[in-house]
Image: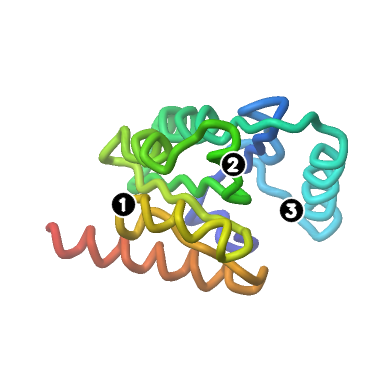
Amino acid sequence: MAGLEHKYIYEIVGHSGETHHLPFVDFGTPPRNSKERLAVVQGMVQHAAECSSGDNTLAAGSRAVRDIRSEEADDYFVFLISDANLEGYGVSAENLALALTSDPVVNAYAVFIAEPEVAKEMTERMPSGRAHLVLENDGMPMLLKDIFSRALLSTRSSL
């Protein structure tokens, strides 16, 4: 998102077994340079290494969809990133889908970074186009570009 601050306002919030809301980047205050971006990643790694096991994905998704509209914007996007190991914690694809589609104005997506066999069933049981699997880190930018492009085309076709 570097260089696009004039176009997009975003925040990055983590979730884990300990919390459903762990701010890493606040709205309107993106990391300005490589050192600040590295500090964000280091904060994520440190929390992941120290947090208790468990899962707050559903609560995180619900809150993100609700909170995203607190600021006026042309479009609203939520990307809920998960390892897809949700059913072990009682989170079904159907419940996650309900959370992500609870506000029709918000474009909310689950992005699973997992082995295909772990994420396959969860992805198949989500509404079409709402769940995606990323196998390699370099697939994330292309996925986001594709989602933004589809949303733009959908908005234009409904005008």
Q: Is the residue under label 2 in contact with that under label 1 (CB below 8 Å)?
A: no
Query: Residue type at mark 1?
Result: Pro
Marks 1 and 2 sit apart, C-alpha to C-alpha, by 25 Å
In the depicted structure, whether residue 137 falls above or below residue 83 = below
In the rendered image, residue 16, in percent from the top left (x then y), is placed at: 69, 34
Query: Residue type at mark 2?
Result: Glu
Q: In the drawing, does residue 36 fall left or right of residue 82?
A: right
Report crowding for label 2: few under 14, some 14 to 19, many 20 or more residues within 10 A (C-alpha): some
Report crowding for label 1: few under 14, some 14 to 19, many 20 or more residues within 10 A (C-alpha): some
Q: Secondary structure at mark 1?
A: loop
Q: In the drawing, does residue 88 fall left or right of residue 68?
A: right
Residue under label 3, please give it. 32
Q: Earlier in the sequence, mark 1 or mark 2?
A: 2
In the rendered image, residue 73, in percent from the top left (x then y), is placed at: 37, 42
> Which tag is nearer the camera, tag 1 or tag 2?
1
Relative depth, front residue between 33 and 52: 52
Q: Earlier in the sequence, mark 1 or mark 3?
A: 3
Q: Which mark is residue 11?
A: 2
Q: Secondary structure at mark 3?
A: loop
Outermost residue, left direction? Answer: 159
Q: Which mark is residue 65?
A: none
In the depicted structure, whether residue 158 falls above or below residue 42 = below
